[in-house]
Amino acid sequence: MLSLPGFAQIIKKPIPDKTVILSFDDGVASHYSNVAPLLQDRGFGATFFVCEFPPNFADSTKYMNWRQMQQLDRMGFEVANHTHNHAPVGKLSEKEILQEISYIEDKCDSLGIKAPISFAYPGYSMSETVLQALSKKNYLLARAGGKRAYDPLKDHPYLIPSWATDPNNESEIMEALNQAKDGQIVVLTIHGVPDLEHPWVNTPPEMFLRYLDFLTENNYQVMSFEQLAGYIDFQEAKNQLKIDLEQALRN
């Protein structure tokens, strides 16, 4: 019973049922050309975890350039940190991790993009060193995998779980969306729509439209992690909740 007041401090205001976070990884070109206009038409928020994906970042047919990422910010979307080169941060030293994170921060600063508060682990690569680096950089939250709903009273903000979409798991994703209730939030990890370079994480455009139609027709609250901070005090959650690296954190 003594812990209840503390938990109440984590939740700033009640989280509506049917709250969903859409997050998009890797700076794929289709995020700017296909995804952003569809989200904007529906008034949906979203978080775009950007990086300069090697070796083809310069190929604007496959990946966004920084002016397009800047435009996402100006459209009201959250531009967040996915490291400079989609680095396997769990295998790097703290110095190397900080360099990867700082690169994206510096690019955002130079273009007037809001300073990133959210991080996503490339390839779900993580370690205690990565967590320490995120803390030093004062990140509010970080997204992992795990295929379960996010419970802000149980899941540490640096280990927010998500489901990843792919060409073959539409029924799984639809079932997952039903778990957005009773204070729990469903987070989706989406790559290209389509993803020409990584077909195993491709989300076909017609499938993506079905997700958007379902969310619209069933009155889901679709937002970014930045917007979710209006409901959750992530700093308080970091202070109170323990980090558990033994739970499922990959998709």
Image (spheres, rainbow, N blue to C red):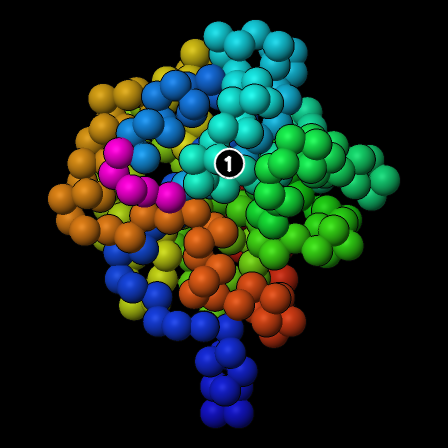
Q: Which residues are magenta?
A: 41-45
- 86 up-or-down from 238: above or below: above
Residue 239 x/y as whole percent: 64, 71
Residue 79 x/y as whole percent: 54, 38
Residue 163 visible here: no
The residue lying at 32 percent from left, 42 percent from top is 44
Residue type marked 1: Asp
The residue lying at 39 percent from left, 72 percent from top is 13
In the image, residue 44 lies in the stretch drawn in magenta: yes
Look at the magenta stretch and give its main secondary structure.
loop
In the image, residue 14 lies in the stretch drawn in magenta: no
Position of residue 49 in the picture relative to residue 54 (left or right)? left
The residue lying at 35 percent from left, 21 percent from top is 34
- Structural crowding at the residue carrying mark 1, measured as other residues with C-alpha within 10 Å and reported as few (<14), some (14–19) or many (≥20): many
Residue 211 x/y as whole percent: 24, 35
Q: Is 141 or 87 nearer to us in this picture? A: 141
Q: Disc 1 on helix, strand or loop?
A: helix
- 51 up-or-down from 16: above or below: above
Q: Which residue is mark 1?
A: 73
Position of residue 187 in the picture relative to residue 214 (left or right)? right
Residue 221 visible here: yes
Position of residue 106 in the picture relative to residue 177 (left or right)? right
